[in-house]
Image (cartoon, helix red, strand yellow):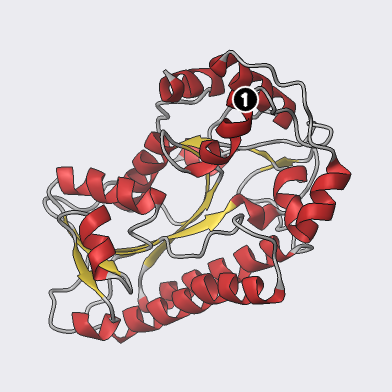
Amino acid sequence: MQVFTGSIHILLTGGTGLIGQALCQHWQRQGHELWVWSRDPRKVQRLCSGARSVQRLEELSAAQPFNAVVNLAGAPIADRPWSAARRELLWRSRVELTRQLVDWMGQQPTAPRVLLSASAIGWYGDQGDTPLTEASPPGGKDFGSTLCMAWEQEAERASAHGVRVVRLRIAPVLAPKGGMLARLLPPLKLGLGGRLGTGQQWMPWIHLDDLVGLFDHLLRSNDAQGAFNACAPEAVRNSDFTRALGQALHRPTLLPAPAWALRLALGEMSVLLLGGQHLQPQRTQASGFDWRYPRLEPALTALLR
């Protein structure tokens, strides 16, 4: 069953990031009214042209009720090692911000109908070759998994206010600019790339167009709630991903990054590169979502042509 007809009044956090910008463009083309909660209104004007910005949630008290809230906020998790200060920032920008957002939602005379809240596949931790679906248990052994668990728990509190809560566990995003490819392409273009560690770890992924489409699909599906794996249905290992990327670039991939070197350089954060999730988007498929790029090679070809 579908919900929402006509223009939708949407509040976004993290609207100036890679996913947020793409969603703003998509929903503005559909004629929806968008507000972005951000500390930097000028950045919103530059990156989310047409959206209205707000620095404090309290400023929204006079606005018409929001139909939907889309929570994408969070400092980049893979930009630098997880020092104590970095962990605090990552926690504050995800868990504490989501807590503040849900508290605000509960204070509104009319609560939004739906909260789409971002999470990450790091929720599962490194579970090797074990096939994982949305019903699988969390990892809970590393900081990334613990962070995602707390992040989702805060979002789920909105259900107590009658809000339909959807938690998207997002895989690394393939995009024409930014995302995972922005880090992988420079060394590969120079012929200096290769697998990470043994290359046998599973490496979920999703094309940005499909991620935008999935957000829109789950926004409009009234029976969609709970966790959804936001990844492509084709599961690949790191070695397969690296080989496909090298072929798309017509470059060799003969220089692997040893696991010991990655652990030495990155510490616990190396789990993002050396760990893996054999992920299956079971509930996403059951919801009726149709991928534009279900397979890796066509996705890379479309992005790199």
Is 212 on the left or on the right of 77, as rendered? Answer: left
Disc 1 crowd rating (10 Å Cα; few below 14, some 14-19, many 20+) is few
Q: For residue 200, which quarter of the picture?
A: top right
Please state which of residues 137 and 258 is positioned toward the viewer in this rendering.
258
Residue 116, given in percent of the width and then of the height, sits at 39, 59
In the displayed structure image, the side of residue 303 where residue 27 appears, left or right: left
Which residue is pictured at 80% across the width and 42% down the height?
128
Q: Residue at x 49, y 43 (%)?
A: 179
Q: Answer whether residue 288 is visible to the viewer in this image.
A: no
In the visual, does 175 lie left or right of 124?
Answer: left
Q: Quadrant of the C terminus?
A: top left
Q: Is residue 43 left or right of residue 65?
A: right
- Residue type indicated by callout 1: Leu
**How many circles with numbers are drawn on the protein?**
1
Residue at 28% in and 81% down: 57
Percent position of residue 138, x then y: 70, 58
In the image as oriented, which residue stretches furthest toward the front?
A: 190
Closer to the camera in the image, 224 or 189 = 189
Residue with the most extreme right position: 260
Q: Is residue 124 above or below residue 60?
A: above
Q: Quadrant of residue 56?
A: bottom left
Q: Residue at x 60, y 71 (%)?
A: 150
Residue 146: x %, y % from top left: 69, 67
Q: Is residue 253 visible?
A: yes
Query: x, y (%) of residue 132?
Result: 69, 43
Q: Is residue 247 above or below residue 132?
A: above
The image quadrant that residue 89 belongs to is bottom right
Which residue is disc 1 drawn over?
Answer: 190
Q: Secondary structure at mark 1?
A: loop
Q: In terms of depth relative to the viewer, which is nearer, 211 or 245?
A: 245
